[in-house]
Amino acid sequence: MSFDWMIRILSENWPMFLRGAGTTLYIALIGTILGAVIGLLAGVIRTIPLPERGAKRIGLKVINALFSTYIEFFRGTPMIVQAMVIYYGSAMAFGMDIDRLFAAVFIVSINTGAYMAEIVRGGIVSVDKGQYEAAQAIGMNHLQTMFHVVLPQVIRNILPATGNQFVINIKDTSVLNVISVTELYFTTKSISGNNFRYFETFFVACAIYLIMTVIVSRVLRYLERKLDGPENYTMTQTNLEAR
């Protein structure tokens, strides 16, 4: 009979499930994009070579220390605690009335940015040093080398990790119910509180989460294959040479 209840719950509450799933995807998508931008910025800055002396060396050291503190803090604390501190803590300490959806996107963005910063830094470090030397040999500075030589390779290399972070964010938005964001988990909890069919209601939510993550994973794999280029590249080159 549980299956019948699942069908009934879905048919009666599908608009609420749809709105909750839409909010979850919105927060996860925007949070991942902004987090990736933060990660790219932090990764580029943290890999700038330090001058031997001068104010620039001191400034870069201070910035690197700030980024390191940010990364350690947000990677070392649970997102649910961060949400409580940022939303309720800011209201109690500073009297700030933050919109819940804005707070949710902000929390996911800065949390994702901390993880992406390390992913980007690892991707930059993995690029062969010979490419840096070649770029410097033709007169490129560090930023030009990054944007024209290194980052195009890094973005391709970190795409699987970025996609994985997107999938994680879809699931981790469930913790934002503590600040009453009406994402999928909060919506499911409200529906189950009305019908008292917790197993069936949350099973429906489980299926929706699974569908979203599977679709996202397939789309990202398709993009990865597109970035890899055609499989018959060698054959095409051979045909051109024959002509």
Image (cartoon, helix red, strand yellow):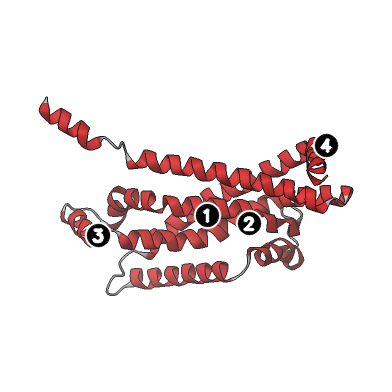
Nearer to the camera, 83 or 207 = 207
Q: Is residue 149 above or below residue 127?
A: above
Please give the label number shown on residue 128. 3
Q: Is residue 56 left or right of residue 199?
A: left
Residue located beneath label 4 in the image: 12
The three-letter amino acid code for the residue at tag 1 is Gln
| Residue 205 position within the rendered picture, expressed as x and y whole percent measured from the top left | 72, 47
Q: Secondary structure at mark 4?
A: helix
Q: Secondary structure at mark 2?
A: helix
- Name which quarter of the figure residue 227 lies in: top left
Q: In which quadrant of the rendered image does the C terminus lie?
A: top left
The three-letter amino acid code for the residue at tag 2 is Asp
Q: Secondary structure at mark 1?
A: helix
Name the residue rendered at 81%, 46% in the picture. 2
Distance (Cα) linking label 1 and label 4: 33 Å
Number of numbered discs overlaid on the protein picture = 4
Nearest to N terminus: mark 1 or mark 4: 4
The three-letter amino acid code for the residue at tag 3 is Asp
